[in-house]
Amino acid sequence: MITAPAGFLAGATTAGIKPSGKPDMALVVNQGPNFDAAAVFTRNRVVAAPVKLSREAVADGTVQAVIYNSGNANACNGEQGDKDAAAIVEATAEHTGIPAANIAACSTGLIGELLPMDKALAGVEVVAGDLGADAAHGKSAAEAIMTTDTVAKEALIEAEGWSMGAMGKGVGMMAPSLATMLVCITTDAVTSSEALHSALQAASDQTFNTLDVDGSTSTNDTVIIMASGASGKEPSQEELDAAVLAVCADIADQLQADAEGVTKRVKIIVEGTATDEQALNAARTLGRDNLFKCAMFGSDPNWGRVLAAVGMADAEMDPDNISVFFNDQAVCVGSTGAPGARDVDLSGADIDVRVDLGTGGTGTAFVRTTDLSHDYVEINSAYSS
Amino acid sequence: MITAPAGFLAGATTAGIKPSGKPDMALVVNQGPNFDAAAVFTRNRVVAAPVKLSREAVADGTVQAVIYNSGNANACNGEQGDKDAAAIVEATAEHTGIPAANIAACSTGLIGELLPMDKALAGVEVVAGDLGADAAHGKSAAEAIMTTDTVAKEALIEAEGWSMGAMGKGVGMMAPSLATMLVCITTDAVTSSEALHSALQAASDQTFNTLDVDGSTSTNDTVIIMASGASGKEPSQEELDAAVLAVCADIADQLQADAEGVTKRVKIIVEGTATDEQALNAARTLGRDNLFKCAMFGSDPNWGRVLAAVGMADAEMDPDNISVFFNDQAVCVGSTGAPGARDVDLSGADIDVRVDLGTGGTGTAFVRTTDLSHDYVEINSAYSS
């Protein structure tokens, strides 16, 4: 619902980049009067051409438009990839009248294939000529950035006199990533790049960065927020923080629910460590353990695998005093099985796992992950073929 | 072929610990005249009762017997687990006449279930009464320690006047582990505990520690080597090192080939880093990346996933100068695709992946992993049910 805030236009088209013939290009334009923006990007050392270009575009704190394509990541394409990303931005500038230096670009899809530039450049012209501020145009953009997503992901927060919308695709970001995660957030609030960046960084840490589907991290992950100021309302930093956190949490929930092959949404909480960082290490180690994730797929309350996994984490623990709870039921206390532990019902789609590492410390952290299913293997073994 | 070296007896029985009714207890006895021994154990902080007990047994550099059970890991069973492991060792002492302090124990199977002690103790009596030095008795022991293994794993090295035999199960050790890895190595060489430990540590680093099937690490992993001295031959440290390395490499090959659900054996070599440690970090990161492992399952030369994975590794690299080779064919040079990269044939069961991180450094390392298949998910989602 990126077009819900005043001052934003969006559109989409089928340029033919995807072999499937589904929509594969989108454009989001901020009409102002303000162009404040902020972004967070993948922490991968290997980054796609559009990420390099977008980092430069947002460096001055303003972005007026973002051009998206799906079906091709334009990553690991060398100098030609950089030239192609720049050419798409230049074409966007030509057809919108926005300076190229104020246009960001995001790509998602297969790594290491050159973009079909004739199709991409023709697509830019089409999408720039069919922009709209209505909900349908926003939705079409959300659909055009999908890859293995099964549903489009949109969010909207209505505040007093201003609003914030968002669209997203994939699952990923910083530490995690299943497929590339792209998120676009729009608001008509009056604010500053600094305020946006502060709010976005904090919200990302609490939402996208707690998602860890398979430990992989994309070359293309990008979250961009743009503020038009068109509402004339200037929220406090606290109000802005709350709104950004809310839309990021909403999109993150949708990403987790639609992760490739997911049949279970698993929230892992670790406590009883000296520091939050140690708790996060242990939570991530468990969230990435394939034996644990397979057990979740099988609705199997195999708490022994929880102990085996956290036992390898970079965190202090008391190996004889670890407790594990599945859906708030104790299944392991003092590092041994609790009565009825094998009978806990994990057949639902949501599973909470809480682990106390038994040091008496106050450190705590959580991550959200998914099970490891047959569909995950199927989707990811056939992706490029 | 643990009974091939002179001085060793072995046997097995079906005690009824496994619900399947398959053999589940084994005993290996060193008749001397020497009892030198060494062992390496899991690095997990959460360790099974028999691991604690075996650490004590081997602490003085001698072990006369090892009692094995499969079907139950006797891990995370608290004080009762420690008592049960001790009771099994005491029963072994009673029926063999060997001091309990010189007997090690190994268990493998489900974590967090108490052993059926009536069955286990009756099994000890049966197996202690049916020991033999022939190949059939050695084979029966190798079969009785299997869990999800589909074949028994044995190895033998014949040297001049002395020999070294081994049996193993599972895949695991230190960093890695799919299921618990247990290995027993026997030799009739005249040697010392210190010489055995030196040889075993070096060989483990080169073999078991390079296996990384799913990044999980068991609570029970144990490799024990025992030397009877019955040949009267005393090899040099170099000869001993070579023999231990050879049997460990043989068993490691068999473990990788029989890993749960494996359809591909993947060797990952990383080079072009400042240090070997950085190369190992990158190799492990790639070997644990589920997207890469799914691509291997699909025989898919998706080198982009290699770059995305190593880009997250704790290793220095030149992001614009990474090269990737599949089965010695260049698929990515200078971080971009090489001609014909998508046409590389990965349909065979063995895939070599070589990655040069492009810093010009001389660091190098390798790990061996497997693909991520439907069978892996199936086996591990149904394990305890």
Image: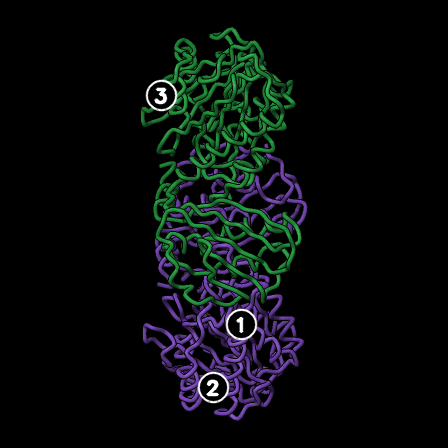
Chain colours: A purple, B green
Evaluate whether residue A43 shows in this view.
Answer: no
What is the three-letter code of the residue carrying label 2? Leu
Chain of the residue that carries numbered disc 1 in the rendered image: A
Which type of secondary structure does the marked residue at label 1 adopt?
Answer: helix
Nearest the eye: B149 or A7 = B149
Q: Distance between the residues labelled 2 and 3?
A: 70 Å
Residue B61 quadrant: top right
Can you tell which mark lies on residue B335? none
Residue A10, how many percent across, how many down?
Answer: 45, 84
At label 3, the amino acid type is: Gly
Left or right: where does residue B38 sit relative to residue B257?
A: right
Q: Which residue is identified by label 3? A: B16
Task: Name the mark nearer the viewer: 1 or 3.
Answer: 1
**Label 1, label 3: how far apart the Cα atoms are:** 62 Å
Instruction: Name the residue tied to disc 2.
Output: A9
Whether callout 2 and callout 3 share a subunit is answered no
Sequence-wise, the earlier of marks 1 and 2 is 2
